[in-house]
Image: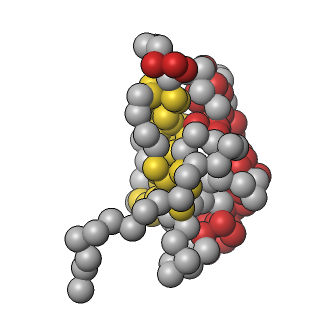
Amino acid sequence: MHSSAAMPLPSPSSASPHLFVNPPRLYDPRANGYSHVVVAEAPARLVYVAGQGGEDRDGALPDAFDAQVAQAMSNLRMAVEASGAGLGDVVKLTVLVVDHSQARLAVVSGALRAAWGDGLAPACTLIPVPRLALDGMLVEIDATAVVPLADGARA
């Protein structure tokens, strides 16, 4: 049975203007480097980062999955920062993985934990896929960030 009354949410922490929620009746996702729910309130500037793969500035793509994940995370960080946001502003990730396996999940989870630490990690969905845009591309990560506007200023 569903209740029509909404459960009150806790307040955001001083570490982030967003609210990160891991309901106690769901498993703890922090070991995999993400949160179940992120609430971001407006007014804010929304930043959408296109899928970042493992290719470097020159378009070179390493063969190893872990090297591609490391480069994709570096590319994601650079793209987020180019918008004037930071990883702490990222509220949602989508990770696409070719030939997904538990070993590849461990690599992705480790990279997410390294990027966000034990703190407030974005909501995340991992989607196994048969292929990505480029031959040899094994991972792609896109992001949505929400940057609160200071005193109602417009970006």
* Left or right of residue 115: residue 34: left
Q: Is residue 42 above or below residue 7?
A: above
Identify the residue at horizontal 50%, vertical 36% (top origin).
145
> x and y percent of residue 152 in the render?
45, 19
Q: Is residue 73 above or below residue 154?
A: below
* Left or right of residue 74: residue 52: left
**Closer-to-camera residue (22/65):** 22
* Left or right of residue 73: residue 150: left
Q: Is residue 2 visible?
A: yes
**Closer-to-camera residue (34/70):** 34
**Closer-to-camera residue (94/97):** 94
Identify the residue at horizontal 52%, vertical 29% (top origin).
147
> x and y percent of residue 100 in the render?
53, 67
Report the label total.
0
> x and y percent of residue 119 in the render?
72, 54
Q: Quadrant of residue 22?
A: bottom right
| Colour scheme shown | secondary structure
Q: Quadrant of residue 4?
A: bottom left
Identify the residue at horizontal 47%, vertical 14% (top origin).
153
* Extreme residue toward the top, this view: 154
Q: Is residue 96 above or below residue 155?
A: below
Q: Is residue 65 visible?
A: no
* Extreme residue toward the bottom, this view: 1
Q: Is residue 29 above or below residue 78?
A: below
> x and y percent of residue 154 in the render?
43, 13
Query: In which quadrant is the N terminus drawn?
Result: bottom left
**Closer-to-camera residue (72/88):** 88
